[in-house]
Amino acid sequence: MPRPLTLPNQSKLLICICIILQIWELYVIKNRPHGTWWLLLIAFFAGGLLTDLISGIFHFTFDYVWPPNTPIMGPIAVEFHEHHLTPTLDPSALTANLTKGVYGAIPLTVITLCVAGMTPDTAAWFAVIATLGFTNLWMLGFHQIHAYAHMGSELSADEFNRAVREISRLPEKEQRKEFARLFQALGIPPWVRLLQRSRLFLRPDVHWQHHITFESDFSSVNGWSDPMMNWLYRLLIKRMTAKPVSAAAGRSLAGETREGELRVEERQP
Ligand SMILES: [Zn+2]
Ligand SMILES: [Zn+2]
């Protein structure tokens, strides 16, 4: 069977194009009338929520919808499944991480520039365009933020794996508390930890809830949309006659079937 069409894993050229488009977009937003700091602040949080929701919806489809032979989407879905089996991501791989972001950010930035060119100069349209502008910025960084949630550990890989396996067997309510305690021990840079604690970046203890069963917390940006996505997921699952394939894989990953199935490579922060 021929290999499905895939996107390049990393491209400095695409990152440069994306940054140039975003600078152009910033210039357009700055020169629109009716801009205020309040509207910009609201747009920052609205853009963060929108990007988080988009990341959650796409993540859900990669986990449960796209067959591997679908052009573009299939290989990304395979990558997501591999990430479940080997939950490592490297924050120092900035080019590869940002390249994943540009695939969403470039088309959205072009759409934003078109919307800006076709709409009247009102406060409401300023808010819409600024929200789209911040969405594009969050989008560019989404996979880097996801990588920070998998940040290297001061614990050995064996120790970390054992701890995750043990926590995954606890009742759901206790898991989040124990994950928070585990991630206190990891070597995450202070500025990243501050952003994670303030919930501007995805918290590792929240994201690991997804890596236990793949049935909740699909967000890859900041987790603000998780309650909405979790509710949607439960609604969807109730209406499905069969459990999705990935959910079954998730249970084995949680260590309920075989010891040592969860693999985390040791890496430095
Ligand atoms: Zn992950
Ligand atoms: Zn997933």
Image (cartoon, rainbow, N blue to C red):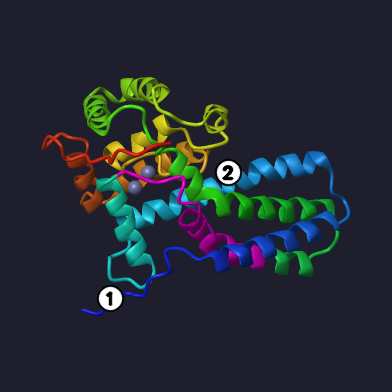
Q: Residue furthest bottom?
A: 2
| SS under mark 1 | loop
| SS under mark 2 | helix
Is residue 187 depicted above or below 146 in this figure? Answer: above
Is residue 95 depicted above or below 88 in this figure? Answer: below
Residue 37 position by quadrant: top right
Towards the viewer: 201 or 132: 201
Q: Is residue 219 visible?
A: no
**Pointer 2: what residue?**
49
Residue pictured at 39% horizontal, 39% vertical: 150
Count neighbours of disc 2 (C-alpha within 10 A) and say few if under 14, some if 14 to 19, many if 20 or more.
Answer: many
Task: Characterize the magenta stretch by its predominant secondary structure.
Answer: helix
Q: Quadrant of the C terminus?
A: top left
Q: Amino acid at mark 1?
A: Arg
Q: Counting residues from the N terminus, which is met first, the one under dot 2 or under dot 1?
A: 1
Could you tell me residue 9's position as x and y percent? 42, 64
Residue pictured at 66% horizontal, 50% vertical: 134
Q: Residue furthest left?
A: 258
Q: Label for residue 23?
A: none
Residue 176 position by quadrant: top left
Quadrant hosting ligand 1: top left
Q: Is residue 100 visible?
A: yes
**Pointer 1: what residue?**
3
Q: Amino acid at mark 2?
A: Leu
Towards the viewer: 68 or 161: 161
Q: What segment carries the magenta color?
A: 87-111
Residue pictured at 50% horizontal, 66% vertical: 11
Could you tell me residue 224's position as x and y percent? 53, 37
Q: Quadrant of the N terminus?
A: bottom left
Is residue 238 depicted above or below 171 in this figure? Answer: below
Looking at the rendered image, the disc whose residue lies closer to the viewer, 2 or 1, is 1
Could you tell me residue 251's position as x and y percent? 20, 40
